[in-house]
């Protein structure tokens, strides 16, 4: 895989990027006549990158701009982001700036997801499938730990210039802006600017607070850590929630212990995983999507068949 070098952004670099993103964006309304009349007659056309789940293709896309993918620690938000990247990499270059996961660990997750395996795939999968497939299409940033915000923006910019159409930054907490709401606002606005400048989608993985009710329901917009500006500037905001109670009961049953009637009813009725769209600027769709887990892969049907084709 080719190695790309990010640069350190300065405030001036950021100002120039914002200026460039705004060029030729001011005009009178009549200039957009053709687009206006087409939309007026036929409605808005859904554009953008699809998600891994076929049931979402007619209602939800990753359009040019910024999305925020939030969740409580241990609820698979990074794993889901990886699966979305892997799906997109079938057709486009993608980039992952993971400040919390070592590159070998990431490669192992991809091996699980490419095979939809329930146990660690053999080394041959890595040699024959994962590494050849990801060459020149799945880019990673070799850094673990906190990172100066301008360096993080430089990494996003470098990946976009390399041609990556989807870039995931995991996570915002590691970019040293979460202790200052103004820094947080400037940082997320800068990501929006880079997405507009390069015509890409940037997904920002973010943490939500854990509440006493976290095991019973997914986080809401008000549960995002930091200021409300994060969701305000995003075109798409999503929370992911793993039903820990259901998982515990399923594990209990698999170990040979019997469930009572109430527990059985809960397992039968409750969703195992929810992917919840809480803000969607580009389509009318908002609400939960039920997902089913097989190993480290998530499906929108309980058939759990491997649908990855390289």
Image: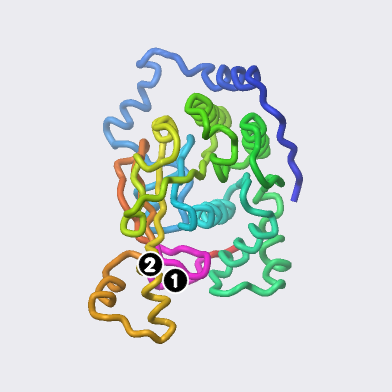
Q: Name the residue under label 2.
A: 301
Between residues 263 and 139, which one lies in front from this camera angle?
Answer: 263
- Residue 310 image position (x, y, % from top left): 60, 62
Q: Where is residue 247 in the image (x, y as percent from the top left)?
A: 40, 69
- Badge 2 crowding class, 10 Å Cα cut-off, few under 14, some 14 to 19, many 20 or more, is some
From the top left corner, tell me how far across and down residue 114 is, in percent: 58, 65
Find the distance from the CA under tag 2 to the CA under tag 1: 6 Å
Q: Find numbered disc 1 in the image and state the secondary structure of the residue it sits on.
A: loop
Residue closer to the observer: 286 or 172: 172
Identify the residue at the far top of this view. Answer: 28
**Up-down: is 114 above or below 86?**
below
Marks 2 and 1 close (CB-CB < 8 Å):
yes
Residue 280 in the magenta stretch? The answer is no
**Left of 247 or right of it: where is 7?**
right
Q: Which of 134 and 145 is in front in this view?
A: 145
Q: Is residue 263 visible?
A: yes
Tally the numbered discs: 2
Q: What element carries label 2?
A: loop
Residue holding disc 1? 304
> Which corner quadrant of the image does residue 118 belong to?
bottom right
Residue 107 % position (x, y) = 66, 60
Q: Which residue is drawn at 31% across and 27% down?
A: 37
Which residue does the image show at 28% across and 73% down from the upper left?
A: 268
Occupied quadrant, residue 198: top right
Residue in the image at 67% along x and 63% along y: 130
Q: Give the range drawn in magenta.
A: 291-307
Q: Which residue is drawn at 31% across and 59% down?
A: 216
């Amino acid at each position: 895989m080719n190695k790309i070098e990010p640069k350190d952004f300065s405030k001036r670099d950021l100002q120039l990027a914002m200026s460039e993103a705004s060029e030729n964006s001011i005009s009178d309304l009549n200039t957009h006549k053709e687009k206006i009349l087409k939309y007026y007659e036929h409605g808005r056309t859904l554009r953008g990158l699809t998600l891994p789940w076929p049931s979402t293709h007619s209602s939800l896309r990753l359009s040019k701009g910024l999305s925020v993918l939030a969740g409580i620690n241990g609820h698979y938000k990074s794993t889901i982001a990886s699966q979305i990247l892997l799906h997109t990499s079938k057709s486009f270059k993608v980039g992952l700036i993971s400040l919390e996961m070592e590159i070998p660990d990431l490669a192992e997750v991809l091996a699980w997801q490419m095979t939809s395996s329930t146990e660690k795939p053999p080394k041959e999968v890595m040699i024959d499938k994962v590494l050849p497939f990801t060459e020149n299409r799945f880019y990673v940033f070799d850094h673990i730990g906190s990172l100066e915000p301008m360096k993080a923006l430089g990494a996003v910019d470098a990946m976009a210039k390399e041609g990556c159409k989807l870039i995931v930054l995991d996570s915002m907490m590691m970019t040293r802006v979460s202790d200052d709401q103004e820094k947080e606002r400037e940082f997320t606005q800068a990501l929006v600017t880079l997405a507009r400048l390069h015509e890409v989608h940037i997904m920002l993985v973010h943490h939500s607070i854990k509440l006493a009710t976290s095991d019973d329901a997914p986080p809401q917009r008000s549960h995002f850590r930091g200021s409300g500006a994060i969701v305000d500037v995003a075109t798409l905001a999503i929370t992911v929630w793993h039903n820990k109670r259901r998982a515990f009961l399923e594990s209990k049953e698999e170990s040979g212990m019997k469930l009572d009637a109430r527990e059985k009813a809960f397992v039968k009725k409750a969703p195992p995983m929810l992917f919840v769209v809480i803000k969607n600027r580009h389509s009318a769709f908002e609400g939960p999507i039920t997902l089913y887990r097989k190993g480290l892969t998530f499906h929108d049907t309980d058939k759990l068949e491997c649908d990855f084709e390289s």
